[in-house]
Image (cartoon, rainbow, N blue to C red):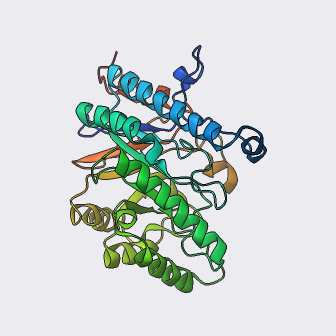
């Protein structure tokens, strides 16, 4: 069952992820993922890497301002804002950048922009490998500290997947739950979980989310590829409750396969644009996961006659 078309007008905000294609191609470019090699740390020192973080943050400020001018008030921040911040050897605390983080966070709050994060696919709390779990915890702590120093409210969440199966889903889920409960409160309170298109569908992670009070990010594209057996209406009702029970504004993800996609791998890949958006209900923010980034959002604005400059 595909998403129904929206009526004229929008009851929620649309956003895009990490990179603004127009600003990235500007001169000078504006983007938030400058990084370096570990070898560079040896030659230029950690202060060089920290300076890259400051530059990325300054560009985030420009990006938020640009979004405001163009009617977009929902953005996924780059997880690469502060290179190597969660590294086991070269990691560092973000308090060196407290004043800048507070300034950018204050701008987002003043403009009522929602900022979220999606730590990378290597984050896996349910892994049987201790090294992977510890790296995951460091990375989640880094993201939580960034948001805390920005003084962002509880709507600024960080999204991860349940992860791999490791031959036994029940054991993996049990490890995930135990590791989740072992993390600091500020990390737990920002963490949300997303259904994926291969390993864990929505109904498989709903019990964990309901039991532990973790909001569930419903990804429409992933659900289409890995739906499970529960009726969609029941899923959406239960998913919404995971957010309302925590008093956090719900967010969803939407993407589409590229035209002509046939194989599973092809269908998993995101298209440049989306042709439709789903009915998400009231008080929902919808992240458009499309290769064209902000241009994909503009195309939806055009389709539904939503003004932007």
Foreground residue, 61 or 224? 61
Counting from the top left corner in percent of width and height, residue 19 is at 53, 33
Counting from the top left corner in percent of width and height, residue 94 is at 47, 48
Q: Residue at x 30, y 39 (%)?
A: 6
Looking at the figure, which quarter contains the C terminus?
Answer: top left
Foreground residue, 264 or 199? 199
Counting from the top left corner in percent of width and height, residue 133 is at 59, 72
Q: How many marks?
A: 0
Q: Considering only vertical position in the picture, is 178 above or below 191?
A: below
Foreground residue, 220 or 15? 15
Q: Considering only vertical position in the picture, is 165 above or below 298?
A: below
Q: Considering only vertical position in the picture, is 224 above or below 71?
A: below
Q: Residue at x 41, y 29 (%)?
A: 61
Q: Quadrant of residue 98?
A: top left
173 lies left or right of 156: right
Foreground residue, 62 or 224? 62
253 lies left or right of 129: left
* Residue 111 visible in rendering: yes
* Residue 5 visible in rendering: no
Looking at the figure, which quarter contains the N terminus?
Answer: bottom left
Q: Residue at x 69, y 42 (%)?
A: 45
Counting from the top left corner in percent of width and height, residue 252 is at 38, 51
Q: Residue at x 38, y 49 (%)?
A: 147
Q: Quadrant of residue 198?
A: bottom right
């Amino acid at each position: 069952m595909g998403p129904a078309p929206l009526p004229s007008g929008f009851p929620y905000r649309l956003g895009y992820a990490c990179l603004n294609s127009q600003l990235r191609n500007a001169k000078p470019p504006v983007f938030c993922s400058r990084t370096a090699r570990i070898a560079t740390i040896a030659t230029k020192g950690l202060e060089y890497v920290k300076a890259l973080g400051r530059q990325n943050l300054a560009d985030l400020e420009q990006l938020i301002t640009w979004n405001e001018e163009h009617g977009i008030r929902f953005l996924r921040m780059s997880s690469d804002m502060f290179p190597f911040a969660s590294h086991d050897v070269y990691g560092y605390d973000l308090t060196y950048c407290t004043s800048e983080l507070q300034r950018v966070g204050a701008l987002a709050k003043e403009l009522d922009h929602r900022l979220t994060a999606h730590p990378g696919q290597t984050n896996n709390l349910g892994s049987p490998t201790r090294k992977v779990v510890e790296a995951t915890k460091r990375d989640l702590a880094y993201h939580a500290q960034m948001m805390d120093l920005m003084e962002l409210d509880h709507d600024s969440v960080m999204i991860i997947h349940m992860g791999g199966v490791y031959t036994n889903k029940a054991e993996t889920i049990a490890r995930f739950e135990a590791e989740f409960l072992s993390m600091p409160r500020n990390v737990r309170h920002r963490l949300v979980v997303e259904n994926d298109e291969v390993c864990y569908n929505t109904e498989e992670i709903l019990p964990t989310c309901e039991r532990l009070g973790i909001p569930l990010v419903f990804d429409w594209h992933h659900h289409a590829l890995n739906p499970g057996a529960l009726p969609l209406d029941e899923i959406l009702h239960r998913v919404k409750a995971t957010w309302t029970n925590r008093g956090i504004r719900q967010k969803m993800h939407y993407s589409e396969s590229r035209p002509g996609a046939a194989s599973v791998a092809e269908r998993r890949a995101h298209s440049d644009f989306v042709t439709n958006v789903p009915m998400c209900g009231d008080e929902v923010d919808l992240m458009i996961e499309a290769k064209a980034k902000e241009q994909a959002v503009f195309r939806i604005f055009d389709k539904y006659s939503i003004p932007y400059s």
